[in-house]
Amino acid sequence: MALTFHHKQLPNGLDIVAERNPDSHSVALGLFVKTGSRDESPNVNGVSHFLEHMMFKGSSKYTWEDVNRIFDEMGAKYNAFTSQELTAYYANVLPEFTEKAVEHLSHLLRPAIRVEDFTTEKKVILEEIAMYLDDPGHRLYERLMESHFGNHPLAMSILGSPESIRKLQRDEMAEYFQSRYGPGNMVFSATGDFAFEDIVKLAERYCGAWPHVDAPRHQPEPLYRPQRLSMTDAKLNRQYTMAMTPGPTAQDERRFAARVLADVIGDSEGSRFYWALVDNAIAEDADFGFYPHDGCGSFYAALTTAPERSAEALEIALAELKKVKDDVKDDEVDRAKNKMASSLVLQGEIPLGRMRSIGSQWIYNKEYRSLEQDMAALRAVNTAALRQLIDEFPFDPMTIVSLGPGPESKET
Amino acid sequence: MAERYFQHTFPNGLTLLGEEMPAMQSAAMTFLVPAGSATDPVDRCGSATVLSDLVLRGAGDRDSRQLTDYLDSLGLQRSSSVGVHHTRFGCAAVAGKVMESLAAYADIVRRAQLPESGFTAARDLTLQALAGIEDEPRQKLLIKLREWHLPSPYGRNSMGREEDLQKLTLDLCQVDYRRRYHADGAILAIAGKIDFPRLRDAIEKHFGDWDAGPPVEIQLMPPPGQVHHEDQKSEQTHIGIAFPSVPETDPDYYTVRMAVEVLSGGMSGRLFTEIREKRALCYSVWAGYSSLKGQGSILGYAGTSNERAQATLDCLVAEFHRLRKGVEPAELERAKIGLKAGTIMQGESTSARAGAIAHDYFMRGRIRPLEEIKAAIDGVTVEKVNAYLKNNEPGQFTLVTVGPKSLNVPSTYQ
């Protein structure tokens, strides 16, 4: 497997990043836009995600029916997603549909936002919000982000609230689109077996006329403080607890060490949380992870327990966090690294996985990292690096949020 | 082109399957052991799930921690799950590491230590997962739909029943392990950078003298009824419908798959178009073909806010009924290219291929080359689909809802 990287910037500022894999059977194409809920003003909260839906509702040339039909005529695997800081649109197609897929994605990213479609889709968004209200993990996560980030824009909900969505006007969305969706604030990412100059030609032909947009992102310093909140919902059976604490940013070289540390502490099997909490069934789930963001970063813990054992489980989890710095060992670090190295190899074999990886890497860092570079950075992590990381990010201050039926929990 | 699919059944009944993918660095294993939820003893539902956890808590000379540490040191991406027919163990990594892990997997399925402390924890975790279903109405709906649609024991929740799990003991688990973890009917499939003759020798060494074991009989009983509502104070009402269809081995299988693709194959599918795009009744709506040995089913799902649930159900049922009027040539073309592209893209993932060849062998007794699958898809015509739909009306649905209020059964229901 020999992956080769290519990059070119079009005159309008659109970055094209591509990785050629001669062994692949398909081509993966994506447009990544550096915009998400953190770039919204509170009065239009949810507009990034709602706009992502509206992209599938047609351009000046196509209706929503055309958009869906044309993707399906190619047998494409296609979708889009919105996070706090990134919105991405992608299609995975057989090589013979490469041009058609680029053309179609280019129409997708120039939406008409027709009022009647906007009004209809608003109801779908409200259903999506309702669906997530039936998911305790999601409710807790939203509350955690809101509390942990406070006045920082990462506190903004991705979906928005039913109120903000109901109030949102078509023209407010169009204005948001104009200000965020232009070359300069997006990257075109492609992987598969192709000649790079062909991809560049297609991007020029279909995206070359897009006007350049400069879309600065507000990067205030987050003000973290220790907090503990609980929410009660009598109909729930289980207690859900999440905690969040500062970690390295998406740009920080220490992010590789942060990932290893997160796996040592809280991978789903064989980690410290596993042995302290899941092996003995104190918790059904006990995860520890790392969320790198643009300009800041977080570690998080997530526990699912019986309501009467949640306090005990949290205490054990916090004790594990306290202990790890003093007794982290070479062999557990090696195991975590080996698991991560395997997942890099497996991801490298699938064009869709690599396309997403190089596209989002470019959005965050304007850099390409080969699998070998990522592998080398991973191999370089050792116990000393983890100890130093914990010195610099000592899991403090921490926001702890809990959701369950009580009785000990109460709304604060 | 050199042969890339291999199959070998050992005298004890274990079948080894291989797909050589020389361009890959990785290999993936799917190991199916004949301990599915359908063969749980009738008063011990959930036994296979408890065992699937317990067998990983020490095997051969390694205790629980040594075993986990060893598998992790190989860098394996691991998974295990319990289905209707099998308990499935999966792993993927750089090919050499997967080969190296085979001896440990032999320990797991042949020489598990089954410790007392591990039993208590494994059962407790299963009970916790069972309790968690109450907090996730969407998951609960799909469990209840299977329970009310499929004959028992196929429809049973693999997590079991609380009263059965409470009665389970370590002794019963040990007996059950000997009864169901055996070679006859087990399938071990590996896809990726492998050399089949070497793989076969390794499997012979580790599993060649594994006991064949006794056959396990299943007696099918009809489901409890056809219409069921679970009262739940949820934000949305979750709606599931199901009806029986042809098994995968039936000559009409791809004809049926195409009809389901027309309903729900992509965003231009009828359910998405009519229920979400035109009427905005829900965010999530889909239909799918679900396969068991000797029996296929078609399932449909929609989740919607409570006041719009009746309209959504009526629409969902109407779309299933509209199928009898046939499909358009353009719809069928989209369905075919979608399925074919999906099949080709599967060839980029060793995990997907290991799973696919294991499934193929279990259903059909052989691996189908990708070319054969593509040809079968190409062989479906509009005439075939429409003749099938005309002569095989959906019939009586099973209807299950989870939400604050039951719904009226649509008048077109029967």
Image (cartoon, coloured by chain):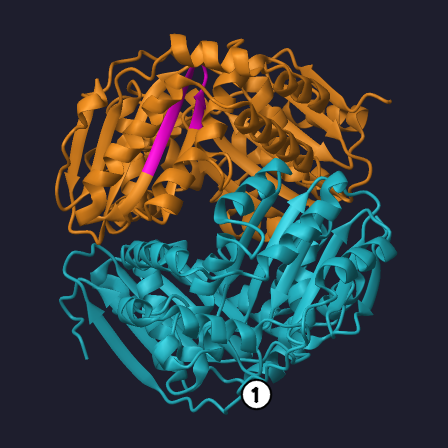
Chain colours: A cyan, B orange
Residue designated by label 1 = A392
Percent across and percent down for residue A284 are 35, 54
Locate residue A311 relative to residue A10 in the image: left or right: left
Q: Position of residue B268 (x, y in %)?
A: 49, 39
**What amino acid type should be assigned to the residue bearing mark 1?**
Glu
- The quarter in which the C terminus of chain B is drawn is top left
Element assignment for label 1: helix
Magenta range is: B289-301
Q: Quadrant of residue A147?
A: bottom left
A138 drawn magenta: no
Front residue of A90/A43: it is A43
Q: Is residue B300 magenta?
A: yes
**Residue depicted at 81% across the width and 30% down the height:** B195
Tell me, yes or no, if residue B211 can be seen here.
no
Residue in the foreground of this view, choosing between A204 and A376: A204
Q: Residue at x 26, y 39 (%)?
A: B312
